Amino acid sequence: MTMRNFTAVVGLFVLVLVAPGMKASAEDIPNLVGVWGGTNETVADGFKLKSSPRTVHITEQTDRRFRGHFDYAGGHKEIFGIIFPDNVSFAWVATISKGQVQGRILSPNHIAACYIESGPEATAGCSDLKRTAEKP
């Protein structure tokens, strides 16, 4: 084995040992705090296709964890969620919902949030949201 090959093998070995312990710094985690507005496109058995305005308020965030709320025709929902380690994907839930939201951060001021619920009231919908204010 040449010295060059030996150095490459040792470097790869060190990377395999160290990389799993590396974490994104707080500066790398996207900040979702603010007011996000856009349109929600939904389909369900009960109402077929529907488009409606959607405004989501993310009121606080600590590292990857966040919480907030949104209002809709049927009421008000408090939400809480998490940003995944890829710093692109996120999810949120609400205590009064049967489904969950999976989302993607498309840019610092643009997200997509999609809701999926199965069962008798099955629904699927996505909101294309842009940050309209930095403060909730």
Image (cartoon, rainbow, N blue to C red):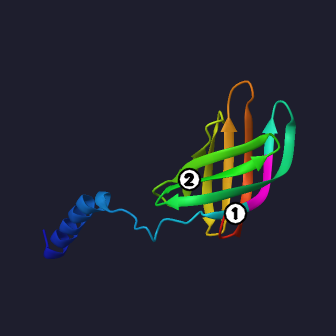
**Residues packed near mark 1 inside 10 Å, few (<14), some (14 to 19) or many (20 plus):** many
Position in image of residue 31 (x %, y %): 55, 66
Main secondary structure along the magenta-highlighted residues: strand
**To which residue does mark 1 refer?**
35
Q: Is residue 55 magenta?
A: no
**Residue 129 relative to residue 59: left or right:** right
Quadrant in which the N terminus is drawn = bottom left
Tag 2–tag 1 contact (CB < 8 Å): no
State the residue at coordinates (29%, 59%). 21
Q: CA gap, disc 2 to disc 1? A: 16 Å
Taking depth in this image into account, of 121 and 74 the one nearest to the observer is 74
The residue singled out by tag 2 in the image is: 90
Residue displayed at 23% across by 59% down: 17
Residue located farthest toward the top when viewing the structure as drawn: 120
Q: Name the residue: 75% across, 61% down.
A: 37
Q: Residue 52 carries which label?
A: none
The residue carrying pointer 2 sits among few (fewer than 14), some (14 to 19) or many (20 or more) residues within 10 Å by Cα, namely: many
Magenta span: 37-41
Q: What residue type is labelled 2?
A: Phe
